[in-house]
Image (tube, rainbow, N blue to C red):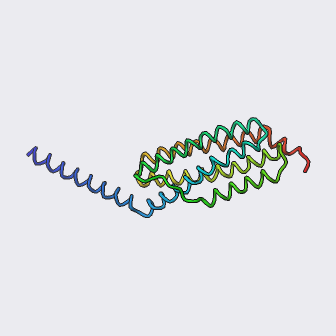
Amino acid sequence: MKNKKSNSTTTSQKGKQSKEKSTKSSMQSSQLMKLFEDELKDIYWAEKALTKAIPKMIKNATSQKLIDALTSHLEETKNQVTRLEQVFESIDKKASAKKCDAMEGLIKEAEDIMESCEEGAMCDAGIISAGQKVEHYEIASYGTLRQFAKTLSLGKAAKLLKATLKEEKAADEKLSKVATTAINVDASQVKA
């Protein structure tokens, strides 16, 4: 009798595992998975573009606090590119980029600000403004990607994306602190 019950439990467990595998398999070939991969390519392009854009911001910044914040975030951004490659690997895909029109526009706006303002506090305030727009885009992107990964039961990807989301939020807070502790006040005192 005990043996029959054990076999019935085993059969039930196998059926449950098979159903879970089937559900996971169908999720990973779903429209959400396709969107997840597409958005991943988008942010991968964006992060790689930022590794080229941030050094220009550093070059144009005059506040040492801003230079330090940007330099620190440049290193984080390089690590985020590597982390995104790990996310691609975790879903058995080759890392590839798709041009991100939004990030291209944000980088262009930052370049325009730096070209149109005089060196000093005003330019620093403009760099912070542009930088925070970038951070907010990244926060939205990583928050969405993390939620997609959780829905798709992609635990490793969700964990990696959560780490980057945390860094992006911290970078935004650091830029706010740099702006409010000196730069915005200094820029407000510069005559137009």
Q: Residue at x 26, y 55 (%)?
A: 18
Name the residue rendered at 82%, 46% in the picture. 122
Depth check, front residue: 123 or 145: 123
Question: Where residue 19 sits: x, y (%)?
Answer: 28, 57
Q: Which residue: 72% across, 42% down?
A: 58
Residue at the location (64% across, 56% down)? Answer: 103
Q: Indicate the position of residue 90 as horizontal and vertical percent values.
A: 42, 48
Task: Please indicate whether residue 185 sits to the left or right of residue 22 in the image.
Answer: right
Number of numbered discs: 0
x then y, percent, for residue 112: 76, 55
Task: Find the residue positioned furthest to the bottom.
Answer: 31
Q: Is residue 25 left or right of residue 99?
A: left
Q: Residue furthest left?
A: 1
Q: Position of residue 96 (x, y in %)?
A: 50, 55
